[in-house]
Amino acid sequence: MRGIVAAASSAHGRQKPTLQKSGSISVRGADKILIPADNHLHTKLCGHAAGEIDEYLDRAAALGIREVGFADHFPLYFLPPDKMIPDYAMDESKLPAYVNMVKENAAVSPINVKLGIEADFVPGHEEELERLLAPYQFDFITGSVHFIDGWGFDNSAELEGYSSRNIDGIYERYFFLLQQAALTGLFDIMAHPDLVKKFNFRPACDLRPLYEETARAFKRAGVCVEVNTAGLRYPAKEVYPGPELLEVFHRHGLPVTIGSDAHRPEDVGFGLIEAVKLIRNIGYREIATFSGRKIKYIKI
Ligand code: ZN
Ligand code: FE
Ligand code: FE
Ligand code: ZN
């Protein structure tokens, strides 16, 4: 299967992209870029995504993407049964079906399909999460902070939370939780690491000390960071993390992966050419993917 080669607006006269015999894709130069992987896909089992899993895979194949990772929302294990948020994540009873669905499709797909999961971090519930993850052989576990002290700050239904809080304080708390999440050791990848900017509420404070502190914690934890293009679809109009934070991650030697966070087949691969360009501009020459919780690298 040949990869799709997308034309970019400017040519820098570097070497053209090559498809290597190993099956890994090399991207050389800003003139033509291939999408090496999409490591963050959802499925309709989470209750707020559309389409069948084979439609996601067909879309990936059409784009020439060689490897995809499903990372659907892990059940909201930290909420009592009567406080469950409907359509926010898959029900606990659906987890085995999710695992089987991804594995069955992986077995027949021409694409390399990885079984991941996107699990929320909520302090105080680490042991429960570890216990619930243990029975499954995930290729990777992506850690997300979607809740700040019970507030679903990235949920448009809870937008009013921004008016009753101090924006600088929200950012500080968000990055603190993200560091804590990484340091649990439960996660391979930290998802959308500045998701707090989603609705474009921007802080007045200088974020650089928080960025440095977060990068140091990530390095100590040995996690990979995700460049997630969903931010381009929201008021932030920027990938998560933005270039300044990604530069800090690069300087601290953190590996990076990419994901579209697609919740419908047509969003598979969304913005990932731009993401690869950004990642290369920052100085990365490879992206990471995972098999059996072990990191491997694809040249970009
Ligand atoms: Zn979702
Ligand atoms: Fe997320
Ligand atoms: Fe997601
Ligand atoms: Zn996500």
Image (spheres, helix red, strand yellow):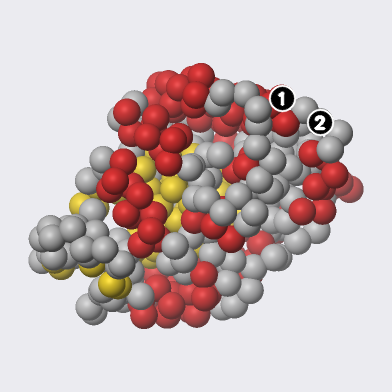
Left or right of 267 in this view: 177: right
Above-or-below relation of 212 to 147: above
Quadrant where the image shows the N terminus: bottom left
Left or right of 213 in this view: 293: left
Query: Which SS class for mark 2?
Result: loop
Mark 2: few/some/many CA within 10 Å (<14, 14-19, 20+): few
Which residue is found at the position 32% from the left and 28% from the top? 251
Check contact, mark 2 vs mark 1: CB within 8 A: yes
Q: Is residue 48 visible?
A: yes
Q: Position of residue 129 (x, y in %)?
A: 62, 38
Mark 1: few/some/many CA within 10 Å (<14, 14-19, 20+): few
The tag on residue 169 is 1
Q: Position of residue 220 (x, y in %)?
A: 40, 21
Q: Position of residue 51 (x, y in %)?
A: 59, 77
Q: Residue furthest front?
A: 10
Which residue is found at the position 66% from the left and 62% from the top? 46
The amino acid sitting under disc 2 is Arg
Pointer 1 residue Cβ closer than 8 Å to ligand 2: no
Q: Is residue 104 visible?
A: no
**Residue underneath mark 2:** 165
Please give the count of numbered marks on the rendered protein: 2
